[in-house]
Amino acid sequence: MSYLKALTVVIVCCVLLLPLWQSYAKAMQRGDTFTGQSWWGTRRDSAGMAPDAVKFRQTAIVQIYAAPAYGWRGRVAVHPWIIFKKAGETQYSRYEVTRWGDENVIRLNRSIPDGYWYGARPSLLADHRGAAAEAMIPRIEAAIKSYPYPQTYRAWPGPNSNTFIAHIGREVPALKLDMPANAIGKDYRALTRPIGLPPSGKGVQVSLLGVLGFTLGAEEGIEVNVLGINVGVDLTSPALRLPFIGRFGYDDAPKNES
């Protein structure tokens, strides 16, 4: 029994400490610091990832981004947002949830479409263009309006920015959204609705307020959540789903789907 306990301790340490160390190492590579530069002095310009809206005037585009959260939170969690434009439009609409501002936590065009998030370069979670994107946009707009927590924000366990994007993913399965394991808040569900769809919109999720749950999804694979710490296995694009870093394994960066 003592060997089993020791093995359990080793496994837990590997699952928690190694990803945390890797997250810290990545932050140091980006030049992040725990203290120092104030938020208003951080980089917020374009990361050069979104297609030029004028050049692609006649193309509908939907993209979802996520970047490490500001400050120390970036070691453990990400902040996501969605941008889209219909065919014929020359500007993107960017929607996200933040805790600062007025009573409504849903923000429209508070930042540029593909901007650095307070110094952190974003990653692309979804990329759809053309007729498929055009068909999604009305459903995305409806999902934004139906978000059940427009005046509530809690960093942990939610609802927060990840809860918002996860809600859109559930309502629009065509997005094929795969939110990383360190998207804390994506699994938040009200106590009255503990069972439902995962953020990908395909599969099943059981979750108690985002602090204890299980997900089996088309994009997520198998994932267990304990106190907002998610661990799992992605079977479609083989990888471990780990806290703090999101995933370790095959790169599943989305390809342009049009």
Image (cartoon, grey):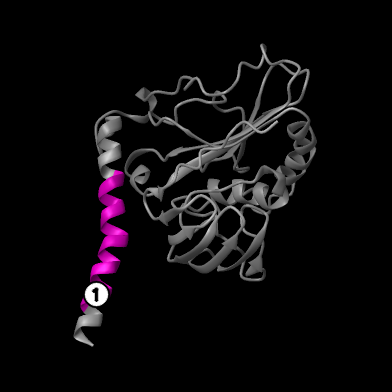
Residue 49 picture location, percent across and down? 52, 24
Choose top left, top right, bottom left or bottom right for residue 4.
bottom left
Q: Is residue 65 left or right of residue 200?
A: left
- Please tell me which residue lies in front, 232 or 23: 232
Residue 133 picture location, percent across and down? 73, 33
SS for callout 1 = helix
| Quadrant (top left, top right, bottom left, bottom right) of the N terminus | bottom left
Name the residue rendered at 39%, 55% in the picture: 243
Start and end of the magenta stretch?
6-23
Q: Main secondary structure of the magenta part?
A: helix
Residue 90 picture location, percent across and down? 70, 16
Within the magenta stretch, is there residue 11?
yes
Residue 53 picture location, percent across and down? 65, 17
Would you name the residue on which mark 1 appears? 7
Within the magenta stretch, is there residue 210?
no
Name the outermost residue toward the bottom.
1
Name the residue rendered at 38%, 28% in the picture: 119
Name the residue rendered at 43%, 51% in the picture: 182
Q: How many marks?
A: 1
Q: Residues within 10 Å of mark 1 (few under 14, many from 20)?
A: few
Report if residue 70 is visible in the image: yes
- Please tell me which residue lies in front, 180 or 4: 4
Q: Disc 1 marks which amino acid?
A: Leu
Name the residue rendered at 60%, 50% in the picture: 166
When the figure is inspected, residue 218 is found, relative to residue 212, above or below; the finding is above
- Please tell me which residue lies in front, 49 or 211: 49
Report if residue 229 is visible in the image: no
Q: Is residue 58 left or right of residue 92?
A: right
